[in-house]
Amino acid sequence: MSLNNTSLLLGYENAPSLPTELNSDGKSLVNIPGPLSSAYETFPPPFRPNKNGFDFHIYYTQSSETESKYARELHERIRREFPELRIYKFWDRPIGPHPVAMFEVNVFTPHQTGAFFSWLAVNRGNLSVLIHPNTDNAFLDHTERAIWMGRQWPLNTETLKKSIVEKS
């Protein structure tokens, strides 16, 4: 786990205490009203502002005719449903840290991230999806900061470690 010494509550030291009472559902907590988080509109640091926010790598087993067909249909559907996103070509073999065939989709705003994540959660079939942010640390982005839908595949992280050494 990569934790720094900065408190997640920095800036809230003098904020009023949060209520402890429950809503009428008997389970959820009452929250104090306040402005919406800026994270709805912009990605927080350490995201790179000059790059897309998240990469979605949709994996499929290239030797499986069924998975390959489904992946191609999903790819086309994404291109038709989300033309504003950047959608890459098919890689029909492992490439970079990715151990199997895949295609990639990039999102640029938190709003796009939430919409595409929600849509993909119910439309990906049995394909696995690696979702990672884009910061200045590709290794952390693909490992500790990564999110998986479906089966988690082992990545070839040596290529990512090399990129950290080259930047130093």
Image: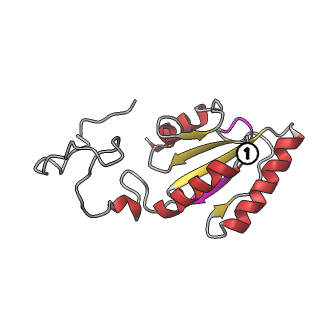
> Residue 71 location, x and y as percent?
78, 49
Residue drawn 81% across the image and 53% down it: 72
Give the position of the C terminus as an image quadrant: top left
Residue furthest toward the right?
65
The quadrant in which residue 126 appears is top right
Instruction: State the residue in front, 34 or 149.
Output: 34
- What's the amino acid at mark 1? Gly
Query: Local crowd at mark 1 within 10 Å, few (<14), some, or many (≥20)?
Result: few
Where 20 sits versus 151, above or below?
below
> Residue 36 location, x and y as percent?
32, 63
Residue at mark 1: 125
> Residue 89 location, x and y as percent?
75, 57
Label 1 sits on a secondary structure element that is loop
The quadrant in which residue 87 appears is bottom right
Where 81 sits versus 14, above or below?
below
- Left or right, 77 with reference to 86: right
Residue 109 visible in image = no
- Is-magenta flag for residue 56? no
Residue drawn 49% across the image and 51% down it: 134
Give the position of the N terminus as an image quadrant: top left
Residue drawn 64% across the image and 29% down it: 154
- Is-magenta flag for residue 104? yes
> Residue 75 location, x and y as percent?
75, 57
| Magenta span | 98-109
- Left or right, 78 with reference to 149: right
